[in-house]
Amino acid sequence: MQLFIGNQNYSSWSLRAWLIFSQYQLDVEVTKLGLGTQQFYDTLAPITPAAKVPTLIDSELIVWDSLAILEYINEQYLNGKAWPSEVNERAKARSIASEMHSGFFYLRNELPMNIRARRKVELSSGALKDIARIDAIWAEQATLYPNEWLFGEWSIVDAMYAPVTLRFLTYGIELSEGAMAYQQKVLASESLRQWLEEASLESEVVEEDEAGESI
């Protein structure tokens, strides 16, 4: 398998797809492409008309979009274990993951992932509402699964929210006790530490993701 990703400092969607390979120690060749570069488009154009990362090639199959990649790997290689086993919990986890996949527009726009930065931003009411909703999700699950992943064992929903823990760190977002405990668990995980270490080796700057004032 070959997984195409973008700059690790900035590419939140790449991180989501990459995490399932790291968590389950699946063999994959990772190819990193600089966001917005000519190499990026020249490489992806013959592979996928979307020309976006992440993109996965598995033999003759091409899968693009983070959630689609996560679902494919779960079905094809993990026998479904990357979702909760109980049907009600699985439905809730999918709902929460889909909420991240399709929602939180203000959060995405105002707090782009930028791992190496520490920034201050003026947040809109929409962004504050997004943050409050995510805090509520994490805090609720923390009461159900103290000091664990959102549904006890690591699952796709944790991959979907991992970049948000980094966004909140970059912009100094204050969280409730339960939400903060979950954030710290994600940040301390071996997979995320590996991603952070690799991201720290990058020097490229993507100007459109350099939001806010340095602190």
Image (cartoon, rainbow, N blue to C red):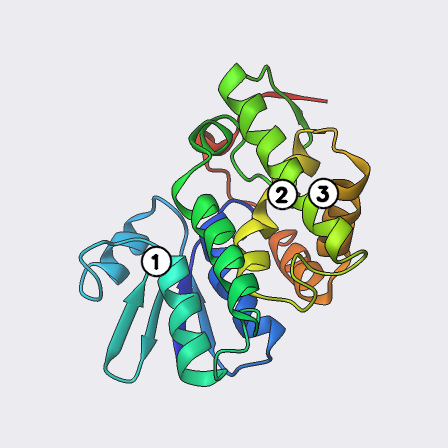
Q: Closest to the observer: 127 or 188?
A: 127
Q: Which residue is mark 2?
A: 137
Can you identify the residue that label 1 sits on? Answer: 65
On the question of residue 124 being in view, the answer is no
Q: Is residue 192 left or right of residue 177?
A: left
- Residue neighbourhood size for the residue with mark 3, other residues' Cα within 10 Å, grouped as few (<14), some (14–19), many (≥20): many
Looking at numbered disc 3 in the image, what kind of residue is underneath it? Answer: Ala
**Quadrant of the image for the C terminus?**
top right
Labels 3 & 1 near each other (Cβ < 8 A): no
The residue to which callout 3 is attached is 139
**Amino acid type at mark 1:** Asp
Identify the amino acid type marked 2.
Answer: Ile
In front here: 76 or 118?
A: 76
Task: Report the residue at 73% width, 66% height from top.
Answer: 190
The answer, for residue 73, to whether it is visible in the render is: yes
Q: Residues within 10 Å of mark 2 (few under 14, many from 20)?
A: some
Confirm or deny contact between disc 2 and disc 3 (CB under 8 A). yes
Give percent across and percent down for residue 19.
Answer: 56, 65
Q: CA distance from mark 2 to mark 3?
A: 6 Å
